[in-house]
Amino acid sequence: MSSITLYPTSNFTFGTKEAEPQSETSATERLNVLRSYYETSGMRRAVDAVFLVHEAKHPHVLLLQIGHKFFKLPGGYLKPGEDEVEGLQKRLNELFGRTGTDGSSSTMFDWNVGECIGTWWRPNFDNYTYPYLAPHVSRPKEQKKIFLVHLPEHRELSVPANLQLVAVPLLEFYNNPATYGAQLAGLPVCLSRFSYSFAD
Amino acid sequence: MSSITLYPTSNFTFGTKEAEPQSETSATERLNVLRSYYETSGMRRAVDAVFLVHEAKHPHVLLLQIGHKFFKLPGGYLKPGEDEVEGLQKRLNELFGRTGTDGSSSTMFDWNVGECIGTWWRPNFDNYTYPYLAPHVSRPKEQKKIFLVHLPEHRELSVPANLQLVAVPLLEFYNNPATYGAQLAGLPVCLSRFSYSFAD
């Protein structure tokens, strides 16, 4: 069984940097962006990262919280033709790296992108995604792959000011699609094949 | 991404052999057996197999059906100290092999046990299992590991007369714990990291 070493949440410091512009705000707007992407470039591809840490020897997942209620995994969309792993590394540096301005130093990380733990498909221009392609779906509109990204023992992450990075216990997600959505609610099942060692 | 070759359900023939004695019949009886196992040998270990086939290029899972309603994956319990993979191969031969009697020929298979796709824990002597160990659970009563078992192009399986082997479409399980239970309902999510190639 694959064993993964997890470090405590407190090994990671979350600094603040200026807010990311949030280009897509409403669900309708997001679907319009997807539709126009699909017309020019075909199926859109997204890649997300699961960062695991531990508290009291229980695995926790790092989520971005937007406002009071909305949670998502760190990640983003790939450009047409962009490699999944390289693209995910870029999206993670856009989120958590620090670009030097006015001669200040910039910080970009080497992200250790590991196993793909799940794939979700969006068959139509709507909010439903599924962990399989149904037989009648020949032209899915979006594919999202979720990767485990292994954290080193320590890391200082710069988090955009409009987002919060929070550590959510794995057991919180289970049977809880109402709060987290189906993709996050499925994480305990996706991750159950691993065993964990909890470092200090 | 790991790609798996699936063959059509019709490549597999399901013969009938004499019924397996079903030692544990009621839920109460099953829990009593677990309790007495735990007292003498500690946590009980179970291993199950996911056999994937396809119909119309959609993955299907082979399930054992008992009576009209109850479905389960093929598999069983390990003996104390028994190796997981060897134990699963033995349980599968007990279910699907044919032991020669009165000079007739016996058939035992080499099962190609692949990736572990999930682990479920039973913290207490009751019917609830979870895909993680909660922090307060120091002495789980049972652990079940689910393995992908890769089928060859053709195989003739002998199925005990009191059981039926049925191929259930992957999409049937999704969001359907009421019919299949949480473990089977989680299969689409567990399996979403694979891509499939559908052979004839």
Image: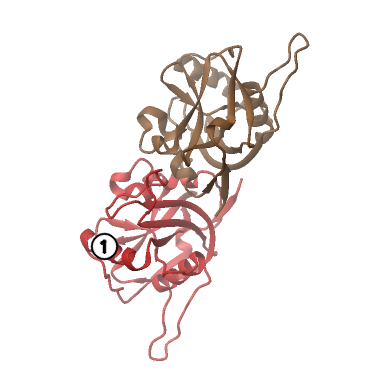
Chain colours: A brown, B red
What residue type is disc 1 on?
Arg
- Residue depicted at x 60% and y 28%: A42
| Rendering coords of residue A142 (x, y %) | 54, 30
Question: Number of numbered discs present?
Answer: 1
Residue A107: horizontal and vertical position, in percent? 71, 22
Residue B150 location, x and y as percent? 53, 60
Q: With B63 as the anchor, is B155 left or right in this view?
A: right
Chain hosting mark 1: B
* SS state under label 1: helix
Q: Quadrant of the C terminus of chain A?
A: top right
Q: Nearer the viewer, residue A114 or B143?
A: B143
- In the current view of this chain or complex, which residue is farthest to the bottom? B103
Decide which of B197, A6 is in the foreground and name it.
A6
Residue A47 visible in the shown view: no
Residue plotted at (64% across, 30% down): A155
Q: Which residue is mark 1?
A: B30
Q: Residue at x 35, y 38 (%)?
A: A175
Residue A69, by quadrant, is: top left
Looking at the picture, does residue A110 appear above or below residue A100?
below
Residue in front for this viewpoint, B172 or B113:
B113
Query: Dot 1, how many residues are within 10 Å of its Cα: few (below 14), some (14-19), or many (20+)?
Result: some
Position of the N terminus of chain A by quadrant? bottom right
Comparing B27 with B104, the one in front is B27
Across and down, in percent, residue B200 comes to 54, 57
Residue B109 in sight here: yes
Spot the residue most to the front: A200
Q: Residue at x 61, y 11 (%)?
A: A18
Q: Which residue ends up furthest to the right in the rendered image?
A: A103
Q: Is residue A35 above or below residue B69?
A: above
